[in-house]
Amino acid sequence: DLPFSFTVGGNFCDCCGKAPREANLPVLFKCKACRLAWYCSVSCQAMCWANGHRDCCKKFGRFEKGDMVMLQGLKKRPDLNGSLVSVIDLPLNGRAVVCILVPTDRSVQVGAVLSIKKENLRHHRPLK
């Protein structure tokens, strides 16, 4: 379900599915490393960690080859903001070489390769 992968989260626990109100919380707890996973309790966090979050959790802003990320904050090409891309290479110049997987604009071809500043990349929530 691709649209789910783009949600920011926080409406339901990623482990048990409880809403904050059901867990007697004003808001859910966020993973301190990736800031993409949400939990209602320490036990749910531990269960998700053991069941695979450990494998996909990366420190916020850290990218690796093969990561699927979204483009954001592009000023010269705002039509590409929100496009899903795959990281191909990470040269040591503060940029990333990416390949377009799902463009937001029809004028951009799937498979197009771009060089993007790392600050314009954002991890999206992994699919359940």
Image (cartoon, rainbow, N blue to C red):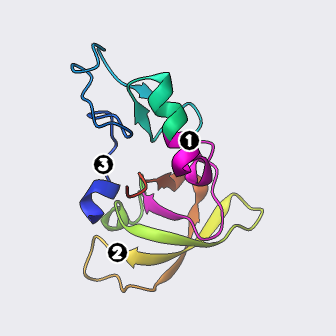
Front-most of residues 34 and 81? 34
From where the camera sits, is residue 62 visible? yes
> Does residue 21 appear to the left or right of 115 in the view shown?
left
Q: Amino acid at mark 1?
A: Trp
Asked if the residue under mark 2 is in contact with the one under mark 1, i.e. CB atoms within 8 Å, the reply is no
> Does residue 43 appear to the left or right of 6 in the view shown?
right
In the image, which is nearer the foreground, mark 3 or mark 1?
1
Query: Which residue corresponds to the image point at 27% horizontal and 74% vertical from the top-left?
Result: 105
Element carrying mark 3: loop
> Does residue 44 appear to the left or right of 104 in the view shown?
right
Residue 60 at x, y = what percent?
58, 42
Which residue is the site of mark 1?
49
In this picture, which residue range is highlighted in magenta? 48-71
Give the answer, above or below, for where 53 lies relative to 88: above
Residue 78 at x, y = what percent?
34, 61
Residue 123 on the magenta segment: no
Residue 96 at x, y = what percent?
62, 66
Which residue is the site of mark 2?
102
Front-most of residues 101 and 125? 125
Query: Which residue corresponds to the image point at 41% horizontal and 77% vertical from the top-left?
Result: 101
**Number of marks in the rendered image:** 3
Residue 52 on the magenta segment: yes
Front-most of residues 90 and 35? 35
Q: Earlier in the sequence, mark 3 or mark 1?
A: 3
Residue 7's mark? 3
